[in-house]
Image (cartoon, rainbow, N blue to C red):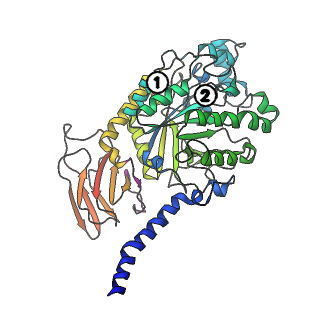
Amino acid sequence: MKKLLLFLFILLYVVPFSSQAQKKSKTAQATSTGKYQANWASIDSRPIPTWFEDAKFGIFIHWGLFSVPSWGPTPKDGASIYDCYSEWYWYRLTDPNSKVNPLFVKYHTSTYGKDFRYQDFVKDFKAEFFKPDDWASVIQDAGAKYVVLTSKHHEGFTLWPSAQAWNWNAVDVGPHRDLAGDLIKSVKSKGLRMGYYYSLYEWFNPLYKADVNRYVDEHMLPQLKDLVTRYSPDIVWTDGEWDHPSETWKSTEFLAWLYNESPVKNDVVVNDRWGKETRSKHGGIYTTEYDLVHEKAQTEGSLPRYWEECRGIGSSFGYNRNENLEDYSSAEQLVHILIDKVARGGNLLLNIGPTADGRIPVIMQQRLKEMGQWLKVNGEAIYGTRMWKAAPAKKIPDVFFTAKGKDVYVICTKWPENGIELEGVALPSKITMLGYTGPVKAAFQNNKLILTPPVVSPATVPCDYAWTFKLENAVK
C-alpha cells in the first residue's frame, strides 16, 4: 500500500513539476546558465518576448528633416518601391547613379533653388502642432499595441538631445524639443509599448565616411546606448546595416549588453538588421518591408522565426506630398494585410508619416480609425493568437485562420455566400460570428465542418469587411 501511495505521489506531483520545469527552461535558455555571449549562437537563442507575439499590430512613425520637403516619386512616375521613399530625399538628391535622381533634382531646384542645402530644412522643422497625447490617442484608437518612432534616420538628425549629434538634433535646433522623449511618455501613459527605429549608418557623417571603426566606437554605440538608458524603450529597431557585416557594427557586443545589463534586458525586442548578412538569419524578429527582404519577395508561407512586416499606408514611409488618394491603401486593404500577416505567424508594423509641423495627415488618421473599428469587433481573432499549424494545406481563397488555445478563428475577407468546408478541426463545442448575436448554422460530416453564414442586414452585419467565425474547442 505504501509503494502504491508513493507511486501516485510521483505521478501526480513530481512528473507535472518536471514537465513545467522543462517548459520554463526553453524561455530561460541562456539566462539560466549565465549571460548571453557576444556571438550569434548565443544571441539567437534568446526567445522573442511573449508580449510582442501577442501584440500583432504596431504603428511605425517616420519623422525628421525629410518631413519638410516631404517629396518623392510614386509608382505612376515609374519608380520602384524603394525609390518612392521621401525619407531618402537627401541621398537621392545627391546620387547621380540613382535612376530617380533627375526627378529629385528637378523638384528641389524648381521649389527651393539649386543652392538650397538639405541642412537648411532644419529651420522649417518646427513641430509646432505636435501634441503627443493626441498622437497616442489616435494610435490607441487604431487598436495598435506598440509604436516605433524614428529616433534617427540615415540623415543623422536625432529626435532627442544626443550628445553625439551636437547641433544636429531636435533640441538644439528646429523644434527645440525632445520629440522622442515626449512621445514615449504619452504612448506609455496609454498602456502601450514603444520603441525606436535607429539607423546604424549616416550617409554623410564625416567620421563614418573616413573611419567606420571609429564611428562605431565613438559615435554609434554611445549614441545607441544613450537612447536605451535614457528612455527604456520596449523595441530597438535598427536599420542601415547593409554597408558592413555585423562584426564591423559590433552588433553582438551591443546585443549582449542589451540583453545582460541594460534597463530593458528582460523585455526588449530587437529585429534582424544588424549587418549585411543578418536579415532573416540573426537577431530577434525577422523583418519584411513591403513584402520584401532586400530585393527578394516574401509573400507566401511563414518565416522560420517570428517576424514582422513593415510598410506605409502609401508607397513611402516619410510623408509624401506627391501622393494622391489612389496611392493610399484603403482601410479594407490594410485590414486584409493585417489578417494575412497574423495568419502567417507575424505582426504588421504600419507606418504613418507626420508633417513637419507635427500633424498626422487626416487621411492616415481616417485609415487608422477604420482599422480600430474593425479590431473592436474582431480583435479577439488577432491579439494573442498564433498561426494555426493544422490549417488546410490547400489554401481556401479569401479564408484565413488563427488559433488561441483550443479555439480556431476563421476569418473571411470575402463574404462566404456558399459556405465554408473545413478539414482538420474537431467538432466545436460552440460556433459564433464575432460581433453577431444570432446563431450560426453548421454541420459536421465525414470529418468536415460545413459553416453556413447567417443571413444579415445592414443593421445586423457586425462590420463592413472581413468577418470572423469562432470555433470553440476545435483544435484537435
Residue under the point 23% across and 62% down: 429
The quarter holding residue 295 reads top right
Q: Secondary structure at mark 2?
A: helix
Residue under the point 22% across and 59% down: 442
Vertical position of residue 156 compared to residue 404: above or below: above
- Asked whether residue 300 appears in the rendered view, the answer is yes
Confirm whether the magenta stretch covers residue 389.
yes
Q: Residue furthest right?
A: 210
Vertical position of residue 466 compared to residue 402: above or below: above
Mark seen at residue 87: 2
Tell me which segment is drawn in magenta.
382-399
Residue under the point 24% across and 56% down: 431
Classify residue 248 as left or right of residue 121.
Answer: right
Residue 201 point in image, percent of width and height: 70, 35
Q: Pointer 1: residues within 10 angstroms few (<14), some, or many (20+)?
A: many
Q: CA distance from mark 2 to mark 1?
A: 21 Å
Of the 4 image quadrants, the one containing the N terminus is bottom left
The residue lying toward the viewer, choosing from 443 and 416, is 443
Q: Which residue is mark 1?
A: 132
Of the 4 image quadrants, the one containing the C terminus is bottom left
Label 2 vs label 1, nearer the camera: 1
Residue under the point 37% across and 81% down: 6
